C-alpha cells in the first residue's frame, strides 16, 4: 500500500493561485481573534480520569508556520484563527473559552455566579474551560446554563460545569429552546450509528495533525473525545421575545427553529448590548446538510430569521458573538456581517429554486452557481464547513428529493453491480487503471476518484487501485478550502491504506439514552427490528410505566413494531411489565438482564416473560465499523 504523497504540481499551482487572488492583506479577523485575550490553557491538553487525552490544542501549533503546498491557503488561515485557544473577554462581564473543543463556551457573570452558555462536547473539556475561567475571575459558582440548540457540541459537557443535584435543587436552572430534548436525543440515537461513523471522516478522527493530515474542520479544530453528558433542561423557551432573568442577568430570546438545528435560539443581553447568534451566523458558510448526515435545513427560513435578528437587535447591539469562532464588535460592522450572512443563505436558496424550475439538476446547479461579488469577497462566507457545492445539492434534495427526473436514473444498479459493468465497458481493470494513471498525471483528480471507485467496488482486493485511489483522494484533500471536505478525502485515503478506524466518537452516551421519552425509546427499538426475520411474529406487550403513570402497548406484526398508549378496553396482551422509565430504558437499550430485574423486584410481570426475550431476538445491532470507501 502507498504512503502519503506530496502535493502534485497542479495542486501546488492551484493553491498558489488562491494565495495571490484572495484578500490576505485583510487582517481584521486576526485582530478580532486576539482581542480580549486573558489567558491560555497551558499545556493545552485535557485528559480524562483514565489519563487518556481527550483534547490537545498544542497539536495544532504547526499552524503558526507558513502555509505548505498540501493545504489550501484559505483553509490554513481559517484553521490558524480557530486554533487560538484560551479565555477571552467579549465585553464587560461576558467571557468566552475558545479553542478547547469544536465549539465555544461562553460565560456570563451574574450577581452571585456565572451563567454557562453551550458547555462544549465533553465534560472534561468543559471542566477545563471553567477552571481556566475561575483561575482568572475567581471561584464563582455556576448559577445557570443555556443550551443554544440541540447539537451535542452545545450541551455534551454540561456535567463538567454543574451537577444534576444542583439543577434539581434549583441552584442552576438550565434553559433551552422548545423541543430541545426531543431533537438532541433523536439525532444521536435514531441514526446515531451511521452519523457517528461518518463523523469520523468529517472531523478526521484518525488523521495525524499536520500539513499532510488534519488542520481543522472549518468550524473549529475538531471534536473532543471525552464523555458526552446531558441534564434535562428546566426552563423551555417557547416564543420569541420571551425574557428570563438568571442570576440578575436579563436575557431576551429569539426562537429560530429549522435553521442550523431543528431546535435553536438566539438571545440578547439588553443591559450589556450583546447578541449571541448561537450557530446561525458564524465565520463560515454553514451546512444545509452535513456530510455526516442529518435532516436538510431550510435556508429560506434561516435567511428570514437573520432578517428578524437584524431588525430586532442590531441597532442596539455593540458586540455579536456566537457558539463558534470569534466576536464582531461595532454596530455597523455586526449589522453588515449579519446582512451578508442573510444574503448568503437567501441567495443560495432563491437561485437554486430558480434553476431547478428551469429543469437544472442539483449537480448541474452546484457546478454553475456563483455568489454575488460582495458576498463572495467576505471571508466569513467561504465554505470552510459547509460549501456552495453540497449546500446547493441539499436545497435541491429538500425540494425535489433524490431523483433528478431522468428515468434512466430511476432504477440504476447498486454500487457494486454498477461498478462491475463500468469496468467491463471501460476495457477491464488493467485498462481502466492505465487510463486512470494518465488522468492522475494530468491532474484530473475528480475523474480519477470516480473511475477508481468503480475498480475498487468491482474488484475490492485490487491493491494497485486502492493505492492510486488513496493518492488521488489525498490530492483532492490538499486542494480543498473546505475543512470537512479535506478531512473526508484524507480519511478515505487513510482507510484505503490502513483499514477501517471504526467510530472513535460515541454520541449515544448513557446520559443521552437516559433522556429518551417512552415514545422515543420504542421508536428507537422499532428501527432495529429485522423485518424479514419478524414477518411471522405476532407479539403484544403492555408496559405500565409506574413513575409516569403511563400504560403503553407494543405490537409486533408483519415485521413492524407499532406502539401507542393504552386507551380503554383492549384485548389482553401476551405479557404486561410494570416498571419505571429508567428500568424500561435499561432493559431495552442498556443491556440489563430482564430476568435479574424481575427477580430483584424492580420489574413486575404478568403473563409470559419470555415474550420480551422473543422480541429482543428480532432486533438487529447497528454496525459502527461499516465500510465507506470499499464495498
Image (cartoon, rainbow, N blue to C red):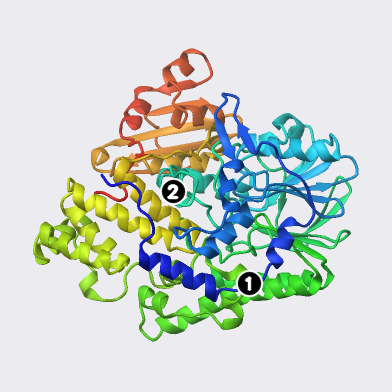
Picture coordinates of residue 32, whole percent (x, y): 73, 61
Callout 2 crowding tier (Cα within 10 Å): few <14, some 14–19, many ≥20:
many
Picture coordinates of residue 554, whole percent (x, y): 41, 38
Q: From mark 1 to mark 2, how far is it between C-alphas?
A: 27 Å
Q: Nearer the viewer, residue 163 or 499?
A: 499
Q: Secondary structure at mark 2?
A: helix
Q: Is residue 545 above or below residue 293?
A: above
Left or right, 433 with reference to 382: left
Q: Which mark is residue 288?
A: none
Tag nearer the camera, 1 or 2? 1
Identify the residue at horizontal 65%, vertical 40% (top origin): 232
Residue at the far top in the pictured view: 599
Identify the residue at horizontal 72%, vertical 36% (top origin): 161
Q: Nearer the viewer, residue 474 or 534?
A: 474
Q: Which mark is residue 195?
A: 2
Mark 1 or mark 2: whose residue is earlier in sequence = 2
The answer to which image quadrant residue 300 occupies is bottom right
Q: Is residue 231 visible?
A: no
Picture coordinates of residue 580, whole percent (x, y): 56, 28
Q: Is residue 460 visible?
A: yes
The residue tagged 1 is 341
Q: Secondary structure at mark 1?
A: helix
Left or right, 385 with reference to 170: left
Identify the residue at horizontal 73%, vertical 29% (top origin): 165
Q: Nearer the viewer, residue 429 or 614?
A: 429
The answer to which image quadrant residue 311 occupies is bottom right
Callout 1 crowding tier (Cα within 10 Å): few <14, some 14–19, many ≥20:
many
Amino acid at each position: 500500500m502507498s504512503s502519503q504523497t506530496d502535493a502534485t504540481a497542479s495542486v501546488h499551482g492551484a493553491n498558489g493561485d488562491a494565495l495571490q487572488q484572495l484578500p490576505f492583506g485583510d487582517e481584521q479577523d486576526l485582530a478580532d481573534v486576539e482581542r480580549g485575550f486573558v489567558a491560555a490553557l497551558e499545556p493545552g491538553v485535557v485528559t480524562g480520569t483514565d489519563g487518556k487525552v481527550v483534547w490537545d490544542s498544542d497539536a495544532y501549533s504547526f499552524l503558526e508556520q507558513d502555509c505548505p503546498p498540501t493545504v489550501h491557503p484559505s483553509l490554513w488561515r481559517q484553521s490558524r484563527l480557530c486554533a487560538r485557544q484560551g479565555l477571552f473577554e467579549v465585553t464587560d462581564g461576558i467571557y468566552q473559552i475558545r479553542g478547547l473543543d469544536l465549539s465555544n463556551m461562553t460565560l456570563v457573570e451574574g450577581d452571585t455566579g456565572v451563567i454557562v452558555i453551550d458547555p462544549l462536547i465533553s465534560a472534561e473539556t468543559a471542566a477545563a474551560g471553567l477552571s481556566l475561567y475561575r483561575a482568572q475571575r475567581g471561584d464563582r459558582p455556576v448559577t445557570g446554563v443555556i443550551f443554544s440548540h440541540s447539537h451535542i457540541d452545545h450541551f455534551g459537557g454540561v456535567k463538567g460545569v454543574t451537577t444534576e443535584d444542583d439543577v434539581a435543587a434549583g441552584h442552576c436552572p438550565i434553559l433551552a429552546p422548545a423541543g430541545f430534548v426531543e431533537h438532541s436525543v433523536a439525532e444521536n440515537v435514531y441514526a446515531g450509528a451511521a452519523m457517528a461513523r461518518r463523523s469520523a471522516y468529517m472531523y478526521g478522527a484518525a488523521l495525524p495533525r499536520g500539513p499532510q493530515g488534519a488542520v481543522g474542520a472549518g468550524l473549529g479544530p475538531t471534536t473532543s473525545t471525552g464523555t458526552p453528558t446531558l441534564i434535562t433542561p428546566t426552563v423551555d423557551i417557547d416564543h420569541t421575545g420571551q425574557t428570563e432573568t438568571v442570576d440578575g442577568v436579563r436575557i431576551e430570546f429569539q426562537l429560530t427553529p429549522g435553521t442550523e438545528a431543528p431546535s435553536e435560539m438566539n438571545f440578547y443581553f439588553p443591559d450589556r448590548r450583546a447578541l449571541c447568534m448561537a450557530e446561525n451566523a458564524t465565520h463560515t458558510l454553514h451546512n444545509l446538510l452535513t456530510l455526516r448526515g442529518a435532516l436538510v435545513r431550510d435556508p429560506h427560513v434561516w435567511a428570514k430569521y437573520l432578517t428578524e435578528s437584524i431588525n430586532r437587535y442590531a441597532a442596539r447591539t455593540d458586540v455579536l458573538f456566537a457558539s463558534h469562532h470569534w466576536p464582531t464588535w461595532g454596530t455597523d460592522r455586526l449589522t453588515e456581517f449579519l446582512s451578508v450572512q442573510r444574503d448568503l443563505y437567501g441567495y443560495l436558496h432563491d437561485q437554486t429554486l430558480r434553476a431547478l424550475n428551469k429543469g437544472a439538476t442539483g449537480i448541474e446547479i452546484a457546478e454553475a452557481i456563483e455568489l454575488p461579488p460582495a458576498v463572495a469577497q467576505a471571508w466569513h462566507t467561504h465554505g470552510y464547513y459547509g460549501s456552495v457545492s453540497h449546500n446547493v445539492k441539499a436545497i435541491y434534495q429538500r425540494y425535489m428529493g433524490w431523483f433528478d427526473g431522468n428515468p434512466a436514473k430511476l432504477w440504476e444498479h447498486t454500487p457494486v453491480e454498477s461498478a462491475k459493468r463500468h469496468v467491463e465497458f471501460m476495457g477491464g481493470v488493467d485498462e481502466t487503471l492505465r487510463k486512470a494513471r494518465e488522468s492522475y498525471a494530468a491532474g484530473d483528480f475528480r475523474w480519477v476518484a470516480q473511475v477508481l471507485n468503480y475498480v475498487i467496488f468491482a474488484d475490492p482486493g485490487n491493491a494497485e487501485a486502492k493505492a492510486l485511489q488513496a493518492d488521488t483522494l489525498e490530492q483532492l484533500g490538499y486542494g480543498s478550502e473546505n475543512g470537512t471536505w479535506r478531512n473526508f478525502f484524507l480519511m478515505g485515503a487513510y482507510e484505503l491504506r490502513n483499514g477501517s478506524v471504526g467510530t472513535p466518537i460515541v454520541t449515544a452516551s448513557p446520559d443521552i439514552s437516559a433522556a429518551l421519552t417512552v415514545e422515543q425509546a420504542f421508536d428507537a427499538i422499532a428501527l432495529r427490528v429485522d423485518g424479514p426475520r419478524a414477518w411471522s411474529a405476532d407479539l403484544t406487550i403492555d408496559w405500565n410505566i409506574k413513575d409516569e403513570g403511563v400504560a403503553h402497548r407494543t405490537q409486533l406484526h408483519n415485521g413492524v413494531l407499532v406502539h401507542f398508549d393504552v386507551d380503554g378496553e383492549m384485548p389482553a396482551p401476551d405479557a404486561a411489565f410494570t416498571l419505571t422509565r429508567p428500568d424500561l430504558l435499561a432493559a431495552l437499550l442498556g443491556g440489563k438482564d430482564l430476568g435479574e430485574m424481575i427477580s430483584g423486584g424492580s420489574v413486575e410481570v404478568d403473563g409470559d416473560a419470555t415474550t420480551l426475550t422473543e422480541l429482543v431476538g428480532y432486533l438487529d445491532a447497528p454496525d459502527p465499523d461499516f465500510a465507506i470507501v470499499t464495498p
